[in-house]
Image (spheres, grey):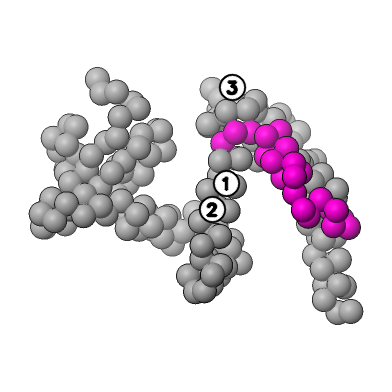
Amino acid sequence: MSDETSVLLIKRYASRRLYNTETSDYVTLEDIASFIRAGREVKIVDLKSGDDLTRQYLLQIIAENESKGESVLPLDVLTDLVRSYQGKAGSVVPQFLAMSFDMLREGPSKAVENMTRMNPMATMPGFDQMVKQQEAFMKAMTGGMPSGWSGPSPEAAQETPAAASAGGDDLEEIRRQVAELKEELRAAKGK
């Protein structure tokens, strides 16, 4: 069996077929997505030129999932990403996204700590409300899982519908708070 921490090398042939060098067989984009979901690091290179094609294929996997209705990225986020490719904002966006995903991986308490520690926005009116919403969001997103959580527990897979609805209160609270923030923003823009 292979070492789960090693990078899985996939070679793209001239025919555009993808070859798994570890198992010596051809793979699909869905296979690559499965490797990544299982925690594997994947690198895809062009056999002839040696060019790294990983980014291109990861974007293709995301696009295919989004087009199937498995939307993870809200339209506003996609729009902002397109805008970030122009001007100076493009240099900040990758760092922000990387930090955001790092915080999600590290757990909710670390995310809130990073959000408040040495943040110049902490003096902004309403910041404490944003922190509370972030805490509630992180709690809802992780289901109260401990720091370092990387997926659903076996217990969660067998959770009853009644137990699953217990977290619904948190979700309703988040929705209510988001609606309040939207109204505050609309009111502030109208001034």
The C terminus sits in image quarter: bottom right
Amino acid type assigned to the residue bearing label 2 in the image? Gln
Q: CA distance from mark 2 to mark 3?
A: 35 Å
Residue beneath label 3, please? Answer: 155
Q: Percent x, y for residue 186?
A: 82, 72
Res. 188 visible in picture: yes
- Tag 2's secondary structure? helix
- Relative to residue 149, is residue 48 drawn left or right? left
Corner quadrant of residue 140:
top right
Q: Percent x, y for residue 126?
A: 87, 55
- Relative to residue 172, is residue 77 drawn left or right? left
Residue beneath label 2, please? Answer: 95
Q: Nearer the viewer, mark 2 or mark 3?
A: 2
Amino acid type assigned to the residue bearing label 1 in the image? Met
Residue beneath label 1, please? Answer: 99
Front residue of 175 and 117: 117
Q: Are marks 2 and 1 in contact (CB under 8 Å)?
A: yes
> Range of the magenta residues?
105-127
Q: Percent x, y for residue 97?
A: 55, 52
Amino acid type assigned to the residue bearing label 3 in the image? Glu
- Relative to residue 147, is residue 171 drawn left or right? right
